[in-house]
Image (cartoon, rainbow, N blue to C red):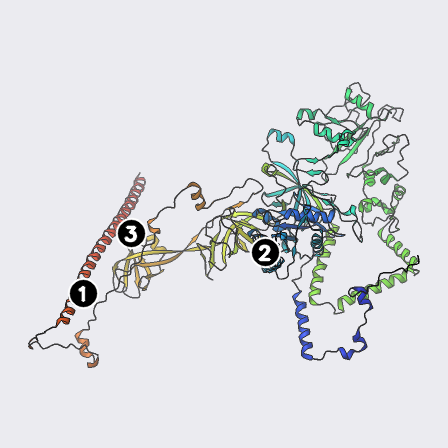
Amino acid sequence: MDAKQTHKAHRVRKAGASAKKGKKSAAKGNPRAFAMQSGQRADRMARRKAELAEKKFHVPMADRTPTVPAPLVVAVVGPPGCGKTTLIKSLVRRYTKNTLAEVRGPVTVVSGKRQRLTFIECGSDISAMTDVAKVADLVILAIDASFGFEMETFEFLNLLQTHGMPRVMGVLTHLDGFKDNKRLKTAKKNFKHRFWTEVYDGAKLFYLSGVENGRYLDREILNLSRFISVVKLRPLAWRSTHPYMLADRVQDLTDPELLEQNPKANRTVALYGYLRGTHVKERDRVHIPGAGDYQLSLTEKLPDPCPIPDKERKRLDERHKLIYAPMSEINGVMYDKDAVYIDLRKTRHEEKAQGGEGEKMLAELQAVAAAPDRLAAQQFNLFSGARPLAAEAVRRPAVFDDLADPERPESGSDSDGTGDGTGDGGSDEEESDDDDGSDGDGSEIDSEIDSADEDDILRRIDAVQVDSDAGSDSDGEPKQRLAPVHTGAKRVNLMKLVYGPARSKPGPGDADADMIKPPAPADDLELDEDALRRYFITSVSDDEAGGGSGGDGSEDDEAGFEDLEAGGSGSGSGDDGDDAGDDGSENGSDSESDSDEREAESLGVPADKLKKLRRKFDRVYDEDDEDGGKSSFYQQQKGELQKLVDDTRLEMDELAAINYRWAGEYVKVVIEDMPCEFMQGFDPSVPVVVGGIPNEEGLSLTTLRIKRHRWFPKILKTGDPIVVSVGWRRFQTIPTYFMNDRIKNRMLKYTPEHMHCSAAVFCPYIAPGSGFCAYFLKRAHRFGIAATGSVLENSQEIDIVKKVKLTGFPDKIHRHTAYIKRMFNSSLEVAKFEGAAIKTVSGIRGQVKKAFGTSGVFRAAFEDKIKASDIVFLRAFHTIPIKRFYNPITSLLSVTSMRTIAEIRRAKGMAVPNKRDSHYRPVERVAKRFNPLRVPKSLQAELPFKSRVKHVRADEGAPARAVVMDKHDRRVADLLGQINLLHKDKARRQREKSAKQKAEYAKKRAAEQDEADARRNKRRKAHFRREGRNQKRGQE
């Protein structure tokens, strides 16, 4: 006690709100010392500030996020073996303190006070990656640092860019393989810059250094989870205008008897999940990528399995850290496509102990055989004290007006499900049930469940038979009364809610005090449907209310509820509309005035003065927002868009009676006539997306703007089937590539090397401007994405032309006129091309005039005289038909796809056809010989002497000189003689070769002429034979 107590020294805050609170601005004390000294610098700073502010602006988009948004879809993507499963397990452990044994399907967790996350693992299959890219709100790219970037990562980034780019962050794993810190630092730097190149500069990249106990380090996962919680997402146009749902549970609702008779019968499948985007209703058309187009036969809102905390909290308690993963095993419970598995893990001492009633029931259910005849003989009690129900009981609709039917059979049959316990025809099973479950007063309860209501609300009618001692009629017929309605899985005392707390008080000796007990009926009880409806409807119409007073006004007032938090009197304006009472005697204006009066009394201000102050406050601040000039043009545009969205939301809230399912709700959709392969090959690891397709069902020709991906090694060919992913759909089609030259659409056999072109495909309607990507089903190269682009337009007809070159040869040649043959086969073909431009090989242009005869010869006019060796060309364009082929890719069912000709040849081992005309032949270019120039003598006489040809002749009478050659001259002369001899021999061989070639060409031309004559004779014979038959028929 004598020792001096030491305290920890106070640490002054250097940053944060506390530090700013104590700081005093020095500029206030001496403003001239902190003034801007340079005007140029002030101008630069102002410009820089304005540029930074402009960079933050985007095109204003309306925020259609619902009040309670659906969980954000966080997709963990990467190649096999990069640590995706471990990352999801670590994040789930961080958020919920639960350990997943296996990640199967979507996993939804509560990550904050107003946020939920749905984690989904994406495989390396390109179909799964395409579906995940269309629904992911946040993408975590797992990268194996020990191996490097892989092609799956780049493929997924290209899919994201075409289907709407969400937020992307990277995670480097397997960093514990680097033993040298310098190499580790260099690798991190290289990965970061390469990742920024593919995504954007400044993209977040996290580093996970090691694994402990099957999870990543807690501190690193904490940093990652904090960034996920605060990330801001930009709404995407396609998703905000289309309803879609990521199914986290699939259930087969098909009748087991039907499956036993026909295992290949179409199924009725129920899909569960959070609805995103816009609203959806029954009978809407949806598309399931990988399964096809279907119609929703039922849409039902279900309680949220993973709700957000009901009110704002500073921190989440352990009971609010929920997890919902029906396909994964959580706490021993796992949902499969057709069953629910519950794992009862017991220790050795627990196995010997006697289990509870619930465990006994589960054990009995697991031990029951699957034989239909044995199931048909089983019975069970739906409620304690109720009549046992058989498997063959018929479900009948509830009847309100005539419940007491005197002609009901006394011996309870399976078809009716009702009977009299005191009758003579009762069975032994009924008597034993009466002894075990009855209350001892001779009464018997029958349960009838109705499922035929249009809104699918379950109702229950209990027909209670009372003995004469318990209050029967004079004629001895038992009275029947209506039991309460069960609308939820939670046990609620409806009698207390409807009739008041004093109406239902179970006695101390009642064995079933926890069940709902209706009051005993009076003798003069009459059931009125309108009066009965008022007991179960929280609000009444104006004509039923009757001004707020009536025969049932006292009961309505007594049955009202108090809002304990707000101190209200049960006006029904709370958040929970299901707990509101019947307010027939109060209206909205009275309740508002009462609340204003209570508020005025609490503040000590008169009510009228409080109203004036409130109106003045609203007027001042509304004018400040509208006319103050503080908001920029960008903020005004955003405000106008948001006002439109809010007004639309208010209008839609008033239409709550329409059976719409809104975004953010957890819904169940039922689809009928689903192929059996969907359930037989169901894999929880493959995402199932249900996307709405409003006005996107009709087939048409669609024009695409396409470009081959720079990493795809081969160019694309017209006519080869390719898979296109656009919108929610993935389909195979046959594209026709073309380019527009401002006059016509000219077909391309192959796509250009480094530029865009257009493509015409046959597919359903697609909104112009939508992005798409194209790939092949079978990966033949390292990079799978073949092309990307966008949709231009939808139309019913697209004219694409192909160049056609017709060739002909001169038959007769005049000065500027020639007769061309072998270009056409009839005079009719010539008539179609009259006036067309033609051209020779030497470049002489001409025009088609008239047909000459019937064999296809025509007269043509040229700008100069042509030669007999010229070939005449006619360039024309032919409209080609577009192949109308549309094949949805059913990857969730049996995949049937079209193969290319090359794939078929490789599969069957067929060789490529060897066509002679397709071979490349060497081009032989012969030097052209020109005749010597001969000038006429008459023209030479008129030419000046300078331009005349001068001929110098040697003297003929001069004697020849003797030439004496020395040894060197003789050698030169011999050499020149040898050279001349070789030249003459070469010229001789050339002449022989030329003659041989001419003979071969003449022989080839003769063969072709013979073939043409034979075809012409054949056509002539057929023509005359047909004409003869016609004449003969005319004579007859």
Q: Quadrant of the C terminus?
A: top left
In the rendered image, the vertical position of residue 559 relative to residue 436, given as above or below? below
Q: Which residue is mark 3?
A: 855
Q: Earlier in the sequence, mark 2 or mark 3?
A: 2
Left or right placement of residue 774 versus residue 15 in this view: left
Q: Quadrant of the N terminus?
A: bottom right
Please name the amino acid that badge 3 sits on: Ser
- For the residue pair 539 and 6, the one nearer the viewer reads as 6
Residue 352 position by quadrant:
top right
Q: Are marks 2 and 1 in contact (CB under 8 Å)?
A: no
Q: Which residue is mark 1?
A: 979
Q: Secondary structure at mark 2?
A: helix
Left or right placement of residue 398 versus residue 60 in this view: right
User: What residue occupies the far top of the structure in this picture?
Assistant: 424
Q: Which residue is mark 2?
A: 161
User: Taking the image as drawn, is residue 283 in sight?
Assistant: yes
Q: Position of residue 497 (x, y in %)?
A: 85, 40
Q: Position of residue 1005 (x, y in %)?
A: 25, 52
How would you rate the neighbour count of disc 1 (Cα within 10 Å): few for under 14, some for 14-19, many for 20 or more?
A: few
Q: Earlier in the sequence, mark 1 or mark 3?
A: 3
Q: Residue at x 55, y 44 (%)?
A: 889
